[in-house]
């Protein structure tokens, strides 16, 4: 059974940092691309970044480039999203998701499996 468990959210002041974790089980590390998404109240879910399991290629949305960085720990089967220089507009529920294959996309509809989400709140 494929499972993703996102954690690491919380309350942080503007300019602060958080590191989100996505613990993954039920599929081979190399076979899936993992994406990070967020959804703020009243807004559509949007893609933040994605990382290919097979070769580590990444893609980022323009609004998080130079602030957010994705990484992986193969031994722990966990993906991370390091978020720096957080802004109040980054406040949202953050999700990790998985899709089979190497194709990098930030479109939520292309992802098959989803974690439960973790709340990130950035105060001004």
Image (spheres, rainbow, N blue to C red):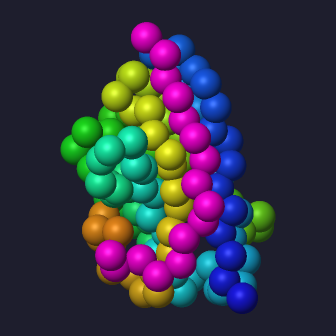
Q: Position of residue 40 (x, y in %)?
A: 39, 42
- In this view, the residue farthest toward the left is 62
- Magenta residues, start to end: 109-124
User: Disc count in the image?
Assistant: 0
Residue at left offset 39%, top offset 23%:
87
Relative placement, left or right, of 107 versus 84 is left
Give above or below for 84 relative to 68: above
Residue found at the very far right of the displayed protein: 76
Q: Quadrant of residue 45?
A: bottom left
Q: Is residue 106 left or right of residue 15?
A: left
Camera-nearest residue between 108 and 43: 43
The residue furthest front is 42
Horizontally, residue 112 falls left or right of residue 115, namely left
- 106 or 42, nearer to the observer: 42
Rendered position, 83 above or below 24: above
Residue 33 seen in this snapshot: yes
Q: Quadrant of residue 18?
A: top right
What is the x, y in percent for residue 60? Answer: 31, 52
User: Taking the image as drawn, is residue 60 in sight?
Assistant: no
Residue 67, percent across and down?
Answer: 38, 33
Q: Residue at x 30, y 54 (%)?
A: 44
Q: Is residue 119 above or below residue 22?
A: above
* Camera-side residue of 94 and 104: 94
């Amino acid at each position: 059974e494929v499972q993703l468990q996102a954690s690491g959210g919380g309350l942080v002041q503007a300019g602060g940092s958080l590191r989100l974790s996505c613990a993954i089980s039920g599929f081979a590390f190399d076979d899936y691309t993992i994406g990070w998404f967020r959804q703020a109240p009243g807004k559509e879910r949007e893609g933040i970044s994605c990382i290919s399991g097979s070769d580590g290629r990444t893609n980022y949305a323009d609004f998080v480039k130079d602030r957010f960085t994705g990484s992986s720990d193969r031994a722990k089967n966990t993906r991370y999203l390091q978020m720096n220089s957080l802004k109040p507009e980054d406040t949202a529920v953050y999700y990790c998701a998985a899709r089979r294959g190497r194709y990098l996309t930030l479109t939520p509809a292309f992802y098959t499996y989803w974690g439960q989400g973790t709340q990130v709140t950035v105060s001004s």
